[in-house]
Image (spheres, coloured by chain):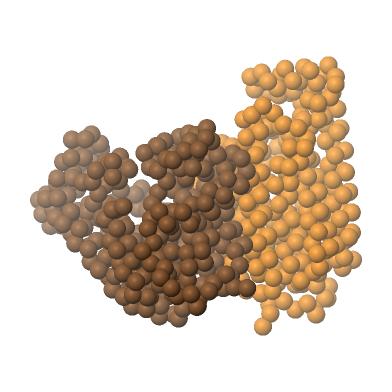
Chain colours: A brown, B orange
Amino acid sequence: MSALDTSSTGVHTSLSPKAVRDAVWPVMREQASALEPTLARICSYHLGFADEHGDPSSAPSGKLTRSALMTAAAAGVGLRPQDVRCQAAALELLHNSTLIHDDIIDGDELRRGRPAAWKVFGIGPAILAGDALQALGLRMVVDDPGPGRAEVLSVFAEALALVLAGQARELTVRLGPGTGVAEYDRIVTEKTSALLQCALVTPALRAGSPQRVLDALRGAGRHLGLAFQILNDVEDIWGDPSVTGKPVRSDLLRRNPSLPVLAALSADQPAAERLRRLWHADGTTAAHLQEMADLVTESGGRHTAEQLSRGHLDSALDYLGRAELSPAASAELTALFDRIVHRTP
Amino acid sequence: MSALDTSSTGVHTSLSPKAVRDAVWPVMREQASALEPTLARICSYHLGFADEHGDPSSAPSGKLTRSALMTAAAAGVGLRPQDVRCQAAALELLHNSTLIHDDIIDGDELRRGRPAAWKVFGIGPAILAGDALQALGLRMVVDDPGPGRAEVLSVFAEALALVLAGQARELTVRLGPGTGVAEYDRIVTEKTSALLQCALVTPALRAGSPQRVLDALRGAGRHLGLAFQILNDVEDIWGDPSVTGKPVRSDLLRRNPSLPVLAALSADQPAAERLRRLWHADGTTAAHLQEMADLVTESGGRHTAEQLSRGHLDSALDYLGRAELSPAASAELTALFDRIVHRTP
């Protein structure tokens, strides 16, 4: 019997973050706990189920953004949360596999306010833990039966490949001579949008939605990723570290070409020229970073970034409106898009 | 139309290593080259297609053991090499993804006589390159149509999960209080046998072979992995580094509990007692390692390991005999098993 009951098009909306968590969390926990003991311990720590000794913990564990999107999109095509629960959990695990490795690659010592997995368990074990979550996430989709399995799997595998390509491209750009806004768009579409698109498209694939719906959902995910990432870049410079969970101005510190900086550097103004000199110099003190931040504002980089983010959010909602979802689910996704971009609970 | 022509049960045997390479290599090369440029460069270097600058190279590139097994097993169930070419290339890429990460985890600076990928490109990029090969290998199997796709994919995903579990277990054991032969068997079955089993079973899944054939091939792969790994352990201590491609006695140096050592440590002899003391002491000079090697021999560890390896090879061939393959393919796999275990070209 099919796991999907497309005739049950009842009220699926108004899924609270808690409801999503209650549906997806136990699957993530069960799957991560069943890994080889050392891998289970590292993954459970990273996911916030456990402290570094393996004891139960209620540490921050991420917002389950991708699960929330998938669950809401499922309601929009007449599916129940449990029809995509396994895929939602798998997507969260894939996402977390990239975070574990990303922290090693970037040398980030903090993740969600706690020491990163590699700081606690060492680089080697953390590499394996990320590998294991990656393999587990794909395996869960491989082994879950139900309609659209082949198509869903293809979308998952493609999304993961895109995230890795985007991360590599970002690393190359950061180490290289610089980048432009087009390259920025490409990187973000790969590293940020790909998993959001996967979240939105998966329920439609399981429900057998037509191509125009899939295209609309893909468009929504692409622009949602850009809107989110650009505002995220703004918050890296001017946000409250207790909200972003990251050290303040890490993008400036690392000369990571974030959108406000790219926009500022391309401005034809004296402030942009001063910013260019500082950007290519070695300064990493708080005073240097403050001066850079001020020059980004003065060159119009902050304003441009905020406008661009708003534009992408509008585009995302525009695509969403064309996805022929139920009105209630559309309304819920609209609110969710806004919460994701503005990082409100 | 099916990609498989099971009616063509002509002469598929006597596949030279060159024939396997000619079939599988171009697929690996094409797929790795199509990755994001930085990832393509690292993977092409690691795979021996290119030097560190991206220029063509004919560096050593591994023996394609898993492809050779898969191709020979395909002939045994009436398939042509091209019927499993994509899967064979995918399996090699998965295997290589684990090697790239393994070199980082173990701090191994050499791979096939050249600097390891992480030494050339840095740890961060090498982590991403391993991730990308892992994702690519699975994606190739996801996207290749043909009979048995779901079953093959499930076997691939399981095999990868087992390899990672085995690597993690090995790391835990190495860092922990020690291990026994049962734990050794489990680790090797996971980290070494799993991909060999995957190679042998995949053609049978595509050909729709019955369960008893699958079970026999799994048994053959399990024991082949053990026979290979145990003799590999012997060669780590007494082999010629120019043949093994590894620094001599790295297992002793790292106190990696290899089978000759485990067998020696469990012997009830004065030499075993002396070995135990050295094993738990800090000595890492060539003289220390030589003394340990001599004590392993004196305690009977080398003899036991060589006997065990032979026993596992016999078991592997016994299982192979029950796999109902064509006689010509059986003969070829018999010769191949022997070459794999004894590392002869």
Figure label count: 0
Question: Is A132 positioned to the left or the right of A323 in the image?
Answer: right
Does residue A27 sit above or below A12 in this rendering?
A: above
Does residue B336 sit above or below A126 in this rendering?
A: below
Question: Is A309 positioned to the left or the right of B180 in the image?
Answer: left
For this orientation, the residue located farthest to the front is A10
Question: Is residue B23 at all visible to an observer of this figure?
Answer: no
Question: Is residue A267 at all visible to an observer of this figure?
Answer: yes
Q: Which residue is depicted at the point 40% across and 54% down?
A: A18
Q: Which residue is depicted at the point 66% across and 18% down?
A: B281
Q: Nearer the viewer, residue A45 or B9?
A: A45
Residue A280, horizontal then vertical, whole percent: 24, 44
Q: Nearer the viewer, residue A164 or B93?
A: A164
Residue B241, horizontal then vertical, whole percent: 70, 37
Quarter of the figure that contains the N terminus of chain B: bottom right
Question: Is A229 positioned to the left or the right of A51 in the image?
Answer: left
Q: Which residue is depicted at the point 51% across and 61% down?
A: A85
Residue A257, horizontal then vertical, whole percent: 28, 51
**Residue B57, located in which quarter of the rendered image?**
bottom right
Q: Nearer the viewer, residue B194 or A45?
A: A45
Residue A188, horizontal then vertical, whole percent: 35, 59
For this orientation, the residue located farthest to the bottom is B1
Q: Nearer the viewer, residue B127 or A339?
A: A339
Q: Which residue is depicted at the point 87% across and 49% down?
A: B315
